[in-house]
Image (cartoon, rainbow, N blue to C red):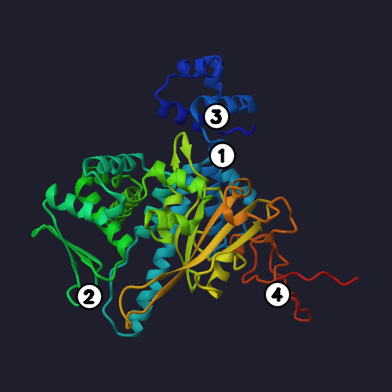
Amino acid sequence: MAQGLGKRIRALRAREGLSQAAMAVRLGISASYLNLVEHDRRPLSANLLLLLAQRFDVDLRSFAGGEDSQLTADLMEAFADSLFEAQPVSERDVRDFVGSTPEVARAVLRLHHAYSAARGSAEMLAEEVVDRQDLAGIDRSGPPSELVSDLIQRHQNHFPELEAEAERLWKDAKLDSEDLFGALADYLGKRLQVKVRVVTVNEMPSAVRRYDPERRELLISEVLRRGSRNFQLAHQVGLLTCSDTLDLMSREPALTSEESRSLCRVALANYFAAAVLAPYEEFRRAADKLRHDLDLLGHRFRISYEQVCHRLTTLNRKGAKGVPFDMVRIDLAGNISKKFIGTGIRLPRFGGLCPLWNVHSAFLQPGVIHTQLSRLPDGTSFFSVARTVRKHRGGYRAPDVLYSLQLNCDVASARKLVYADGYDLESLSASTPVGITCRLCERLDCRARAFPSVHRRLQVDENVRGISFYAPVKDDE
């Protein structure tokens, strides 16, 4: 078993509040041997790894170098930037760098984030100068959305404190799933002295929820359907009753700007609202029984398709986990607006997704579920479900916005999904060869390639045209 995992053992022991001696007793090894393992002077054997999984309910994937692998993938994507074309970097070099000095590696990644943000700001400023517009300030702290996304990823999109608060609300407010809006409005009115009013679009044309703390009044737009109205009420309850918890969780040092901390509060209040609308255990059992039929789950809990997908990614409670899912949402331009990694597949941070993923083809048939069995260059296979979701905010003159949302799970878990029926999940021929993003993909002969790969220097022969502009051409026999 690979070395370099000592810090994970120490972190696990600290989380459990155990001394080396106490943990050694539970593992049936000597304290001195555990000390050597923690300092990477002895390898983490397969037997010891299994004991850790059994005695401490540890997901073995957390010892598969997940955090380091993600950092390696992010750095490889950063080094694929044209900035580094003159100094090609191999994946082995990056892995060694991450393994030896992970904090320095993170610093390099943050530096590239800052560079990318500054480059984008410079381009915007150049356009403003040409247009003779007023110059705006430059934000050098990094995109707040990325900082919050990273925080959610570090917590595996599971926040026990907010789950507990949601469960407490169900008891205190005596919520009724048949009239959740009425019960939440009653709780806001009687317990929190907040009046709830549903108002017309004419009264509130640019917002769907507006809270006035001075008047203690919450306005909800008529354009929201029942499930969305419930969500907005639960969100407001979270902001008012869990404020201290939200503040504490938003003070993580990684959130380096006031904007990122404010955005984190909103994201966590959304998490609380989802936990209220779809209580953890009830939702997990229903997902298992319905074989993760996304539409049926939406009907049962009166939540949207996207909310169902979100909630499935949060089922990471110790001892009661659901199927691990990745989730990614893109728009028609291919921009990734939401993402979460639950299976270990590396989603791109800077570039676009491989065009062969079915999250793109879902746009061709809006509202229809698309399934796909895919295989990455390293042999990893995964099963995916993709469908478009339409955001409609009003009447005839309000434009719709169309997104595509994809859920991925590993092949072993796919058998728990109704969508995998009829698939030969073990067959390589049944899977579609895909990559993550073009610059990092090793499939040089791909017809969909849009950029050259960092794995091979670009060679151009003006007399020969391959299956794509960047595909190498073999000499014909």
Residue at horizontal 57 percent and vertical 51 percent from the top: 417
Of the residues under marks 3 and 4, which one precedes in the sequence?
3
187 up-or-down from 373: above or below: above
94 up-or-down from 474: above or below: above
Number of the label disc, if any, that sits on residue 53 = 3
Q: Which residue is mark 1?
A: 61
455 up-or-down from 452: above or below: above
Q: Amino acid at mark 3?
A: Ala
Question: Where does the image place residue 87, in percent across and percent down from the top left?
Answer: 60, 60
Q: Amino acid at mark 1?
A: Arg
Q: Amino acid at mark 2?
A: Val
Q: Secondary structure at mark 4?
A: loop
Number of the label disc, if any, that sits on residue 201 = 2
Cβ atoms at labels 3 and 2 below 8 Å apart:
no
Q: Secondary structure at mark 2?
A: loop
Question: Where does the image place residue 370, in percent across and percent down from the top left?
Answer: 58, 65
Q: Amino acid at mark 4?
A: Ser
In the displayed orientation, state which residue is furthest to the left: 215
Q: Which quadrant is home to the N terminus? A: top right
Question: Where does the image place residue 425, in percent across and percent down from the top left?
Answer: 68, 52
Residue at horizontal 31 percent and vertical 48 percent from the top: 276
Q: Is residue 222 left or right of residue 471?
A: left
Q: Which residue is mark 4?
A: 468
Residue at horizontal 23 percent and vertical 43 percent from the top: 174
Q: CA distance from mark 3 to mark 2?
A: 54 Å
